[in-house]
Structure formats: C-alpha cells, structure tokens
Amino acid sequence: MVDEKVIEELRTWIEVEEEVVYNIGRVRAESEGTIPSLLLYELVADSTKHINILNAIIDILEGRFKESTGNEVSYDFIKDHIETEKTALQFADRLRRETDNEDVKLLLSHIMEEEQRHHDTLIHISERYVKEA
C-alpha cells in the first residue's frame, strides 16, 4: 500500500532541499575560492544527495525498485571495500589529530562521518543482500 501522505511530505522536503541548493549556490558564487565557499559547497553537495535519495525513497514506496536477487554486488568486492573504508577512516582520523587548523579539523571530521556511514552501509549490504562466495 502506497502512503500518499508520506510521499507528499517527501516531495515537500525535496522542495526545501532544492531551495537550499539554489540559495546557497548563489551565496557561494559570490565567495568563490574562500573557506566559507568550501564549507557551503559541502551543504550544497549534501542537499543534492538528499534530493536524489528522497526521490529514490518515493520510487521505493511507489514500487518502482526491483527486488534484490542477492547477486548485484560480489561478496569479494564488498569485503574489500569494507577494508578500504576502514583504512580511510583511520587515515582521516590521524590527519585530523595532527592538524591545528580548525577548518581542516571540521572538514576531516565530516569526511570521517561519511566514511563511517559508508562502512555501515557496506556492512548492511553484505548482511542483507550479498551471498557469500
């Protein structure tokens, strides 16, 4: 059963994210090449990603995604990439601890949060959708 109220709320959320992308994009254009511009870029990139994910959630709710066969991604690929993400996390953490620059620390912290999310996502995929070779 499709919950039209949830889908409508997701569409409203998409409109908010699109407004964020537009408004921050205009401000960023005026501050190109500065640290605030870089930090604002991160917000635009995240909001753009959110728009894509929210649209995909609508597609899931409306039944436009295929069921998984468990063979879309190889076990070896997922296993190797889990290790790559773990290495990236360790690398970013070391760099963050070694710098005194607060802007760099913030950006590295954000990358670490994303790398942790990537790691968690890969674990989820491996447990739910990948058949071990």
Image: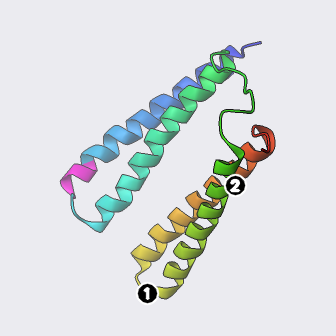
Query: Does residue 28 belong to the magenta stretch?
Result: yes
Q: In the rendering, at what x and y percent does residue 33 appear? A: 21, 63
Q: Residue at x 55, y 67 (%)?
A: 88
Q: Residue at x 64, y 57 (%)?
A: 80
Q: Reading the chain from its start, which is encountered first: label 1 or label 2?
A: 2
Q: Residue at x 75, y 32 (%)?
A: 70
User: Which of the colour schemes (rainbow, by chain, secondary structure, one colour) is used?
Assistant: rainbow
User: Where does the N terminus fall, quadrant-wise?
Assistant: top right
The magenta span reads 27-31
Q: Residue under circle 1?
A: 100
Q: In the rendering, at what x and y percent does residue 18 appear? A: 41, 34
The tag on residue 44 is none
Q: Residue under circle 2?
A: 79
Q: In the rendering, at what x and y percent does residue 76 appear? A: 68, 50
Q: How many marks?
A: 2
Which quadrant holds residue 112? Answer: bottom right
Residue 27 position (above or below residue 8): below
Left or right placement of residue 14 versus residue 66 in this view: left
Residue 101 position (above or below residue 113): below
Residue 33 position (above or below residue 50): below
User: Where does the C terminus fall, quadrant-wise?
Assistant: top right
Name which residue type carries label 1: Asp
Left or right placement of residue 109 versus residue 86 in this view: left
Q: Foreground residue, 24 or 79? A: 79
